[in-house]
Amino acid sequence: MDQGQTLLSLQETDLAIIRTEKRLEELPVKKSILATRQKMRDVEALKAKVGELASGFSRAMSRNEDETAQIAEKFDTEQAKVMSGDITNPKEIQHITREMDALRRRKEKLEMEDLDLMERAEKAAGQVAKVDTALKQLAEQEATLTTQFRTEGGEIKTELEALNKKRTANAAELEPELLTRYETLRAAKGGVGAASLKGHMCSACRMELPAQRIEELLAGPDIGVCPVCRRLLVTTVVEDDS
Ligand SMILES: [Zn+2]
């Protein structure tokens, strides 16, 4: 290949590299992975909330149990006093009986509360189980997607490696000064530093060049400069304007 052809090949390869990198970046499976991970974080947060709720219920249940035990003990003590026959003062007996009634009522109330708490705790445990199942499913989904990403991404990376090899070979063939000019223009002009003539047009800026300019370019060096966009213009490769 002559310098002009090599330059155009390098340009084409550079654009292919950009397209391929974009394809890798925008792989649909990548978006799916990110979405799945977000969902996992949401469900983890939900799990923490539901777990807190469940442990709140179990703490309340054990407080309830403690109090129930204390009441039973007190009740037994009071009952033992009455049964012992030591207390003969009717007022005192009346007082103890009232006390025992109050303890019984409190015990009944605690029992009701305990049933209610049990029901709520069961519900919360059910929710925890549901959330765990959801998390497990999401983790499986994430693993499948990651495998898919490795396969698809791996294919694109292989393509990229081949393109980069081609780029290195093309760049090595170019005269250093020409390569530097190309790189500078490429950086300054949206990734396109070299163009060819397409009929009467510059293939990069797509401006129709006056016939006289075309003549001058064709009479000049193999690689000139587009009078409109100032990119390197290869004049030995004239494409059809179809
Ligand atoms: Zn141009």
Image: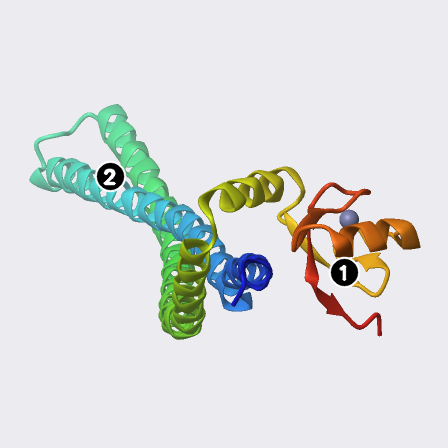
Q: Amino acid at mark 1?
A: Leu
Image location of residue 33, percent across then percent down: 46, 62
Front in this rendered view, residue 59 or 200: 200
Q: What residue do we see at 36% from left, 45% from top?
A: 52
Tell me if residue 222 comes above or below residue 242 in the rendering: above
Q: Amino acid at mark 2?
A: Glu
Image location of residue 231, percent across then percent down: 69, 45
Q: What residue do we see at 52% from left, 60% from top?
A: 17
Q: What residue do we see at 37% from left, 42% from top?
A: 105
Q: Quadrant of residue 172?
A: bottom left
Q: Earlier along the polypeptide chain: callout 2 or callout 1?
A: 2
Q: Residues within 10 Å of mark 1 (few under 14, many from 20)?
A: many
- 63 lies left or right of 177: left
Closer to the eye: label 2 or 1? 1
**Dividing the image into 4 quarters, which one contains the C terminus?**
bottom right
Q: What's the CA distance linking mark 2 and mark 1?
A: 94 Å
Q: How is the image coloured?
A: rainbow
- Where does label 1 land, which residue? 197
Image location of residue 121, percent across then percent down: 37, 56
Image location of residue 199, percent across then percent down: 84, 65
- Where does label 2 land, which residue? 67
Does the CB distance between marks 2 and 1 fall below 8 Å? no
